[in-house]
Image: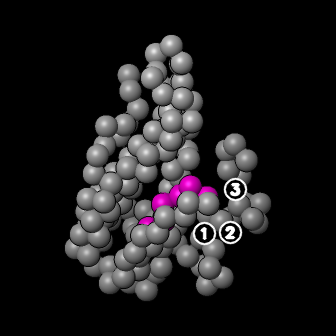
Amino acid sequence: MGLPYENATSGSAALDDIRKVLTRFGCPRFGTMTDNEKGELLVQFSYRGRDVTVKASYRGYAAAWLQEYPYNPSRHRRTREQHEARAMDQAQVSVCSVLRDWIKGQTIAIEVGILTFEGAFLGQILLPNGKTVMEHAVAAGLLQIEGK
């Protein structure tokens, strides 16, 4: 069946597309950052006084890729470490495309009145203490994250 975005090749182009989408949407500030320690891509932007941080896990995508394509020494000409590195390399590209499409979808939903800005990005809105609404809800015991 294949993994969504497994053939994505436009990592930096997808990040540039995010910038274009958010600029057209009216966001005066935008930036991306890679956190290699946590294995995450962060996209931050501001919209009408609201700061937003979106985090996407490279490691999560790489784990899904490895589940879809487990290492098999008889079928692969590389070592397990090389196979896992390939998974992470693809994840770093694919996650950019996933975020591009998700952010574009959320902004379109806002523009056409399907969602409010707060409804579309509630979990990613930054609170005055620097935590997102999602992080606050989890820390306060209001919400449990699956798998944790």
Q: Nearer the viewer, residue 57 or 113?
A: 57
* Left or right of 102 on screen, residue 139: right
Check contact, mark 2 vs mark 1: CB within 8 A. yes
Q: Please name the amino acid that badge 3 sits on.
A: Leu
145 in the magenta segment: no
* Left or right of 19 on screen, residue 75: right
Q: Please name the amino acid that badge 2 sits on.
A: His
Q: Is residue 70 above or below residue 58?
A: above
Q: Nearer the viewer, residue 53 or 57?
A: 57
Q: Between marks 3 and 1, how big is the CA–CA gap?
A: 11 Å
Q: Between marks 2 and 3, how big is the CA–CA gap?
A: 9 Å
Q: Please name the amino acid that badge 1 sits on.
A: Val
Residue extending farthest top: 74
* Left or right of 106 on screen, residue 74: right
Look at mark 1 in the image and give the residue it sits on: 133
Could you tell me which secondary element the residue under label 2 belongs to? helix
Q: Residue at x 24, y 69 (%)?
A: 20
Q: Is residue 139 above or below residue 5?
A: below
Look at mark 2 in the image and give the residue it sits on: 136
In magenta, the rendered stretch is 38-43
